[in-house]
Image (cartoon, rainbow, N blue to C red):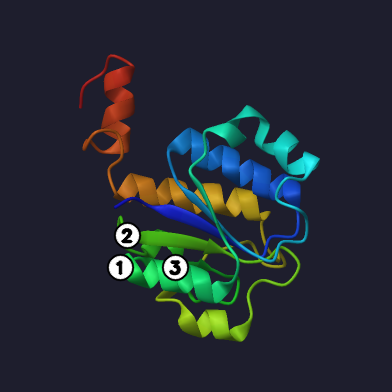
Amino acid sequence: MTLRIALFEPDIPQNTGAIMRLGACLGIPIDIIEPCGFPISDRALRRAAMDYGDIVDLAVHPSWDDFRGVADEKGRRTVLLSTKAAQPYLDFCFESRDTLLMGRESAGVPDHVHRDVAARITIPMAPGARSLNVAMAAALVAGEAQRQLSVGGGAPLDNTLQQQNGKSS
């Protein structure tokens, strides 16, 4: 089982395209939960994903209930990134069965989604800051999750990078 990123009813095609590119580059499958604020085939989405749109592992779900049904059937754990959460993402223990759920840019997720998820995490920010761009938040948390899950053929990520650079630990 592998880490996934899910987008709940995304509003902005450029953010969705950037997250699709992130998924393609890091080998993280992407789930899109409709309805979206734009057509999935929208030109801006294709432009933002660039040529990575053809190589990303993408699943589109017609509703939250459909997404939950698939996730439950496959034994996946849904982890919501939220400004309303108390637990910092750096203190969270990620599992390979996790799906990182990103809320809608304009409104986050409704209360019933907050209640349906297994865990809620946040990115601590400076006083007065509201939130990060959803694609930046996805990249930060996915990077930490992959670090914890030791990507790169079973070696911790930092060891893999050292080996690629001709260094050993």
Residue shown at the point (50%, 68%) measured from the top left: 67
| Amino acid on which the number 2 mark rests in the picture | Arg
Where disc 3 sits, the SS reads: strand
User: Which amino acid type corresponds to the residue marked 3 in the rendered image?
Assistant: Val
Label 1 sits on a secondary structure element that is loop
Q: Can I make out residue 146 in this image?
A: yes
Question: Where is mark 3, residue-wise?
Answer: 79
How many tags in the picture? 3
Query: Label 1 belongs to which residue?
Result: 75
User: Element at badge 2?
Assistant: loop
Question: Residue at left 77%, top 61%?
Answer: 37
Q: Do the residues labelled 1 and 2 touch (CB within 8 Å)?
A: yes
Residue depicted at x 74% and y 34%: 47
Mark 1 Cα shell of 10 Å, populated few (<14), some (14-19), many (≥20): few
Cα separation between marks 3 and 1: 13 Å
- Near mark 3 (Cα within 10 A), the count class, few <14, some 14-19 or many ≥20, is many
74 shown above or below 3: below
Query: Which is nearer the eye, 9 or 98?
Result: 9
In this view, 151 is above or below 121: above
Residue 98 image position (x, y, % from top left): 37, 61
